[in-house]
Each structure stands twice: as structure tokens, then as C-alpha cells.
Image (cartoon, helix red, strand yellow):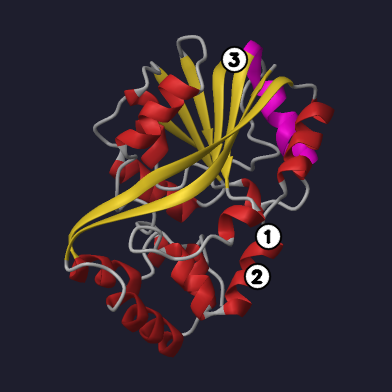
Amino acid sequence: MGSNFHHKANRNSYTAREADQTWVNFVRDQIPFKPIDKAADIGCGGGIYSKGLVRLGATEVTAVDYSEAILAGAKDHCKEFPQIHFVQGEAEDTGLHSHQYDLVLERALIHHIKDLEPTFAEAYRLLKTDGTFLIQDRTPEDCLLEGTPTHIRGYFFSLFPTLAEKEISRRHKSETVRKYLKQAGFKRITEAKLWEVRKTYPSKQQLLDDLQSRTGRSILHEIDDKELKQLVGHIDKKVPEDNVIEKDRWTIWRAVK
């Protein structure tokens, strides 16, 4: 089926949580960069990580997404953050001014993009000299990790192998990301792994309701209602009744202009 990011019904699909402190700490402590003045969040979705950039000290965040419906939800989600303003644009053609940003973030974006070359060239154009480009996404290896009571996403793919095949097919290998970063002109390219807390649920039922609504998980739009019911029943047997901590494994690339 796939997720229609332009449909008004999906405007709040990516606003139902906040960036966890595990993410903020990792970016601040493990991937150091100069203090942020201006940042761009390309593929901002619901603005969750635009707000995270403000928590990291950014004084101005430009949040870009190609979906008018998603941006409408993001604006509502971030209405108490005057530091964030929103722009409709494509990752390879944002329409933003050149050499203006200390940091460009692309989180959970590049698996939607087949050709990384123009997207990375655009990020390079936006950054100031010595500016930092952060990419956060899953490699095929990240997707193949087994399911556990905390790594719930792994159950999706063990139960539906064809879903795993589809997921892996749209993920870029690490060497591909590095290749196009170098080609764009970036230097000092590093890579790290992050187990990010996606969300903490006081009760299992809240998690199951979240899954049932497919909230914030575009991959679940690839299965039908019957398969979704089967998945929810499977996970119901795997996780504890209370205090469910859901984590996802990500790869983060850091590159400097």
C-alpha cells in the first residue's frame, strides 16, 4: 500500500512523540561540533527533531519537508517554538540560501531517496565552511536485527519476511553513503551506531494501540489490516505488560564541509 505523506489524514502521523534524551545526548556528546547558531532539518516530518535541535542550542531552525500536509501538522506540533520556521521544499532543491547553516540534519530521510548525489550536494551548498552534516538512517544490517521486547521493529520483519525484503531494498549501504559524501566534497566523515529510545509506553496496550494506528511507522502501511492484526497479536505475546521501552538501532554519519 505505502504511506501517502500528502494526505491530510496523515498530517499528525509523525507528531506523536518527542526526541528522546538518548538522541540529544548522543548528538551532543558523541558527535561533537561547534555551537549551533542556524540549523536546517531536511525532511523534518512532524518537527520532532527540529525541536531536538533547539534543545541542542540552535537559535534558529529551518525545517523543510516536501509534504504540505505533514508541514501543517509540524507547525501545530511546534507552535510553542518560535525558533523554528517551516519551508516546503525538496531535499535536492530546498530553495534555501547558500552557506548559511552551521548544521544540516537529515534524519530518516535518505531511504526515501534513490539518488543521493543531488541531496548531498544540496546539503553541502547550504552549509558554512566547517559546518556539520548529520545523516541518521538504517543500513540493511540495522534492519535485520532480531526482535526483542525493546527492539520491537525486529518482530515486523521476522513475521513478514517479504516486508524485510522491501525494507532492505530501500536502505543504503554504509559504503554508498560514504561514497556520495566524499563525492559531494565532505571531509572528516565518521560513522557511529545509536540505540535510540523511540518511545516509552507506561502500558503495553498503549503500544498496541500505537501499532494498530500505524502511527509514525511508514513501513506498516505496506501490510493490510489482517496482517496488522496478526502482527499486533504477535507483539502482544512478546512484550511486558508495563513500562515498555521501544528502541531502534540507527547508523549516524557525520561529515564536515
From the image, tell me which residue sits under label 1.
Answer: 170
Residue 225, numbered circle: none
| Residue in the foreground of this view, choosing between 252 and 128 | 252
Q: Secondary structure at mark 3?
A: loop
Q: Position of residue 248 (x, y in %)?
A: 44, 52
For residue 197, side relative to residue 182 (left or right): left
Amino acid beneath label 3 = Gln
Residue that numbered label 3 is attached to: 100
Asked if residue 119 is positioned above or below residue 11 in the image, the reply reads above
* Residue 83 makes an appearance in the image: no
Residue 201 on image: x %, y %: 21, 57
Image height of 234 relative to 119, above or below: below
Sequence-first disc among 3 and 2: 3
From mark 1 to mark 3, how far is it between C-alphas? 31 Å
Is residue 183 visible in this depiction of the protein?
A: yes
Residue at the image point whose x is 45% and y is 10% from the top? 35
**Quadrant location of the C terminus in the rendered image:** top right
Q: Which residues are magenta?
A: 117-130
- Residue 39, compared with residue 51, is above or below; it is above
- Other residues around mark 3 within 10 Å, as few (<14) / some (14–19) / many (≥20): some
Q: Nearer the viewer, mark 3 or mark 2?
A: 2
Secondary structure of residue under mark 2? helix
**Outermost bottom residue:** 226
Name the main secondary structure of what is drawn in magenta: helix
Residue sitting at x 50%, y 16%: 32
* Residue at mark 2: 166
Q: Is residue 195 above or below residue 11?
A: above
Q: Which amino acid type corresponds to the residue marked 1 in the rendered image?
A: Arg
Instruction: Choose between 119 and 171: the one closer to the eye.
Output: 171
Disc 2 and disc 1 in contact, CB within 8 angstroms: yes
Does residue 107 appear to the left or right of 97 in the view shown? left
Q: Disc 2 to disc 1, how far (Cα)?
A: 7 Å
